[in-house]
Image: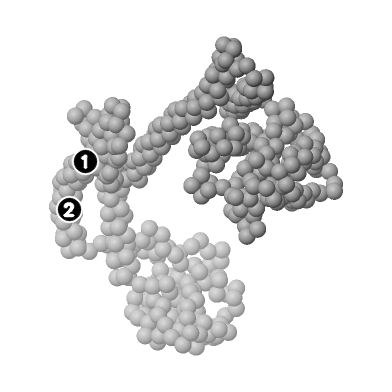
Amino acid sequence: MKNKRGIFSSLIKNHTLFVLSSVLLSLFLVFVFLFKLSIDLKDSNFKVLPSQLIQADFKRIDSKQVESLDGWIEILDENNKVIYIKGNKLDNKESYTYEEILDLNDISISNGVLQIKDLKDQKDIVGFSKPFKDSEGNSRICIVKYPANKVKSQLVLNSFPEDIEKHILPNIKVFVALLLILLILNIFLFSRRISKKIGEPLNSITEGINTMSKGNYDVKLHFEAEEEFILIRDAFNTMIDEINRSEREKANIEQQKNIMLADLSHDIKTPITTILNYSKALNDGLIEDEDQKHRYLNTIYNKTLRVNEMVDDLFQLTKLESVDYELNLNREDFVELLRRIISEHYNEAMEKDISMDIVLPEYEIFLDFDQVLISRAISNIIVNGIKHNPRGTKLRIELKDYKDKIILEIGDNGKGIPDSIRGNVFEVFVTGDESRRSTKGTGLGLAISKKIFEKHGWKLELSNPRKDEKTIFSMIIPIK
């Protein structure tokens, strides 16, 4: 209630000042209007100057008031020759020069008074000129002349008619009284209306904030108001949407974390169980056959390597997700790095009868990168193409050089990636348990590769399949 009253009082105060200033301005304008009206009435009753007499049909000019002062009217053509006279012409001028026309401007009106300007030379006849267009569009000049002794230096024009004053003044008093009453009523009604328009949106905003502070993020503001309140409403609703999105992402991350821990526990538990059982059998002397002992020891060694690889990958992924992790950047030839990586996996590919189609530039391309991490990221993708595809698969490794970027593509015509996991193939443990066991992978390789590329400001994407290739990984590297 206090806030409402404060807004209401402020509106009354400010609006009252506004209206009072408007009233004063209105009264001033009314006064100016009446004064101008009186001048216009006087001028309309006493026409003695060309500007008051001119009309397109100059033969119909009313010259009575001019002639009452023994004056007359002359109309000049475009050559400044007299072509029409109205009244008793007292001189014999039949044409004028431009200097003579300009010299005629001896009469003016100031504050409703007809005046003769100070003359350098004593003149018997004074006058005033004004150009105009006749009814046929021809240029004409209207000249009004008077005997100087007939025009006083200050001739007061007709006074404001008394009968008009008698009618206007009482009406002005009534008008002012009614205006004040209506303005006071308008101030009250306007202030109430504005207070309501401001109060309702503020109440809605306050209720929304109170609801949100209690942990309910489903609240939305719905009201129509002025632009400032609409901006607040939209900002509030956007904030609610962002909070809800953040909460969903947080819940999804927590869920993924739990899934990852469950999958990791399963993947670690399986080889550790095998190691435990085999080592116990050997320790208890249950295995006497030397060949069988060798197989048990070899299995224990391989399972240990798998657990170590998994822990190493998980540790690497955790480091990459840390904001404090710093890259060991050096400027090196990226093409030469690719050649070394491919050579490391060439024999592995040949053993599985996988051919490698390699397309690399003959020139050097120097980039800033962490050699160890980038080697691991690219190796992960090549190893995936070798391990997860059947014999006879064709593996393509191609580096495309553009002006502003280079693109490394690693594609194959193998069995491809199922549509069900294409959208989240770079997430940890996206394949099923059975798939992971059959391929002997950790399920972290692609996630690590993507993190490494992102740390460098590069991109790793799974491109759409082509007619001759089912799986294509594209590494987009901007050139700085």
Q: Quadrant of the C terminus?
A: top right
Q: Residue at x 77, y 31 (%)?
A: 330
Residue reaching furthest to the top: 284
Q: Quadrant of residue 217?
A: top left
Q: Residue at x 37, y 36 (%)?
A: 244
Q: Quadrant of residue 348?
A: top right
Front of the two marks 1 and 2: 1
**What colour scheme governs how the chains and residues are painted in the rendered image of this protein?**
one colour
**Side of 141 where 295 appears, left or right:** right
Residue reaching furthest to the front: 289
* Structural crowding at the residue carrying mark 2, measured as other residues with C-alpha within 10 Å and reported as few (<14), some (14–19) or many (≥20): few
Question: Which label number is shown at residue 196?
Answer: 1
Q: Which type of secondary structure does the marked residue at label 2 adopt?
A: helix
Q: How many marks?
A: 2
Pick the front one: 387 or 361: 387
Q: Which residue is under mark 2?
A: 175
Q: Amino acid at mark 1?
A: Lys
Q: Residue at x 69, y 33 (%)?
A: 376
**Side of 172 where 312 appears, left or right:** right
